[in-house]
Amino acid sequence: MAPPGSWLSIPANSHFSLANIPFGIITSKHSQAEKRPAVAIGDHVLDLKAFATENGFSGLPSLKESLEVFSQPTLNAFAALGQPIHREVRKYLQDVFSEATSHPQILKDNTALQKAALLPKHETKTHLPMQIGDYTDFFAGINHAFNVGTMFRGPANALQANYTHLPVGYHGRASTVVVSGTRIRRPNGQTLLDPTADPKVPSFEPCRRLDIELELGCFLCSSNPLGEPVPIKKAHESIFGFVLMNDWSARDIQTWEYVPLGPFNAKNFGTSISAWVVLPDALDGFRAPKLKNETSILPYLKEDREDSVYDIKLEVDLTTPDGATTTISRTSGANLLWSFPQMIAHHSVGGCAMQTGDLLGSGTISGKGETDLGSMLEMNQAGKREIMLAGMDVRKFLKDGDTVTIRGVCGGEEGALVGFGECVGTIESAVVFTS
Amino acid sequence: MAAQSWLHIPTDSHFSLSNIPFGIITTPDSQVPHPAVAIGTYALDLAVFTENNGFSGLPEFQAHLSVFSQETLNAFAALGQTVHRAVRRYLQSVLTEGSPHAALLQSNSGLRQKVLFPLGDIHNHLPMQIGDYTDFYAGKHHAVNVGTLFRDPKIALQPNYTHLPVGYHGRASSVVVTGTPLVRPSGQILDNPAADPKVPIFSPSRRLDIELELAAFVCKCNKLGAPVPITDAHEAIFGIVLMNDWSARDIQAWEYVPLGPFGSKNFQTTISPWVILADAMAPFMAKGLENESSLLPYLQEKKVDNMYDLELQVNLTSKQSNTKCKGAIQQTITKTTSRNLVWSFPQMLTHHTVTGCPMHVGDLLGSGTISGLDASERGSLLEQTSGGKVSMKLNGGEERKFLEDGDTITMTGWCGESGALVGFGDCTGTILPAVSL
């Protein structure tokens, strides 16, 4: 489907084509203290607060009573208006930017409003797009789960008995979710320098097995009361939009701490997300079937459609302190056994209260090969193999100064790409502890 | 404390002059949640007290008065322990017979009418806005009891247990205030755990359990990447409440490997409404459980008496006794002490932030289930019933393995002498039948 051209010059390979219209939170060069909503369009950002204040939404009368949502420092109030409003606003903005816009006076011919609200991206800074009440990480990348399970238990017992029956997940730490570009400090913690020793005596060290996890994130836009589960049929209506996620992990800290209550300090030192929330409508043309589940699942998890995941082309780059960049993984966002609606239904089935702004992680996404893996643990085969980088450098796990960049984009048609931009983080050296 | 209040306070009240716990209430006069303290059988409305110059005798607090018109205690907590201490002691003085500040309220019947509400006339709300909730596992006897149910007693505890405060991130949205009814959760359970292959069914939980815990609220932030050293960690504690970490044991058994408990916990977590400040607990500290392991330096606390020393009690009221008897019979099923922990809250907070994890004002830390050594001191029904094998016998002839619809669980806790008790009041919840999907 060829989208309309825009009167705004948008690079043909931009992730933020007219087909996208993702939402974020910005500050700008000339208004640095005030966080406010925006959409990304080409190499520009539309400041929605300025746009709303200067009557940019006058062509959308249904929004008249709700305009204050665009003066908030997070997208939560906008998200809470619900999918029908998101849909209308996105369509309206697509129209406003179209060459053949039905509202030329709003922006195309309005140089004053363009000056006030249409900002070059390099003059803006992005911030966490939502206030996150709770963050949950799932484990729905079955190839990742299989690879990791095989390392510890062999292929026959790689997956636990529950894996194909329910979307396994654990509560994460909301306070450590940060926006792309935030520097990530190597954590210190308890690790076993010799895992084979008996008795096991930990030492306190900077993490030596610092890893990435390539994931998708999903923000929610509705709240269910405590005690009232979200039925699977309605779960997709709870989705505001999607981001890329890097669930940085400290593998040595994880190994020592995680039995029996799950990963904790191994995860809570930082979780990065991309800045621009891509709405489900923008991804609708890129639906794909979930990975096949051989198990017969319980009715509360059964979806009406199998194509409830998205074929997002995901790439992971590692840039060393020398500046050499290697693409260490290329895979698809469809490599999931469970969809986000299924995760929402399962998460709330006991009565758990989900809320607008909650963040769900998909779990590490890996393909079935060697160049499509979502974590270095899989790439280095539990630390046995070195990952070859450009410039003859090698890695097993991350070094100080390494930068990891996750990119994701759908579509191949120029001028119609729907992408997430980047999710970037650079590793800083660990805090030095003096006893 | 020898001082008496000019208010009549029953000698068995948890809210003696020695306490002064803080909460959030609504009253017949104001449906907007706002701060209060509990004193005897009354709530003292801090919003109205402040509006009427109640803090005129505390000049250093004048710059901060707006914290008591907020809907949560977060702004007050963020002011730090020095301010909490000053405000608490000032309020004690206002309520003490013959003190320099007594006249402010004692002889002002107009103001007394506006600010003092019988506790039965007010509603309690969540005292803080909770950014993150973490549950720890520091009740060593509980960990041994539970470990023994699944493993050889010699290896009941995992090797990591005595080296680090084991914990997991909980669901902040599950935390509710006492009195909130609990809808029995449904989920995937194994009808026959011994079957092979394991095929789950979808069912209301048949093994609904309690967990008796203490929980601490945080009053100090640290930035991402900036751990809180053990020497400073105690300053980050605002105060404590009781917590019931309701658990669905059958849902837990099926889901928890390898990522920990999830749906078995996130349906509800109940806390008591009145936060006992760290300052009020200062005279009631004691040694906790011995830790045989040599601790890494970042966890070593100088203070030997680093545990709160409270009596804790769990009562069960069954629906039957509720309906059959005039005045429901509350049967005590557990009595133990909060000394039965092997890690302190400062140690938990230090461990939690050692990776650089940020804490925020209002964050909640659960201690983990508290059990003693004796059979009468078990903080969960799982332990009381030896894994659901042995029924508890209740008064009136009923039996229980796990909770039934209509059961009410009341947790309570206190320290101090009669007439000077420092306690939580109650942490209660009644089980409602599961919803059908």
Image: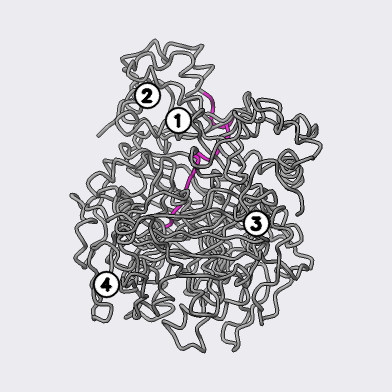
Type of the residue with mark 4: Leu
Residue B44 pos. (x, y %): 61, 37
Left/right of residue B250 with respect to residue A421 in the rendered view: left
Specify whether disc 4 shares its chain with disc 1: no
Q: Which residues are magenta?
A: A119-137
Judged by depth in the image, the label closer to the viewer, 3 or 2, is 3
> Which is nearer the N-term, disc 1 or disc 2?
1
Question: Is residue B247 at least partly visible in the picture?
Answer: yes
Judged by depth in the image, the label closer to the viewer, 4 or 2, is 4
The residue under the point 34% across, 42% down is: A239
Residue A395 pos. (x, y %): 57, 67
Residue of label 2: A93
The residue under the point 24% across, 81% down is: B196
Residue A429 pos. (x, y %): 69, 59
Task: Describe the element under mark 2 as helix, strand or loop.
Answer: helix
User: Disc 4 and disc 2: Cα gap in Å?
Assistant: 51 Å
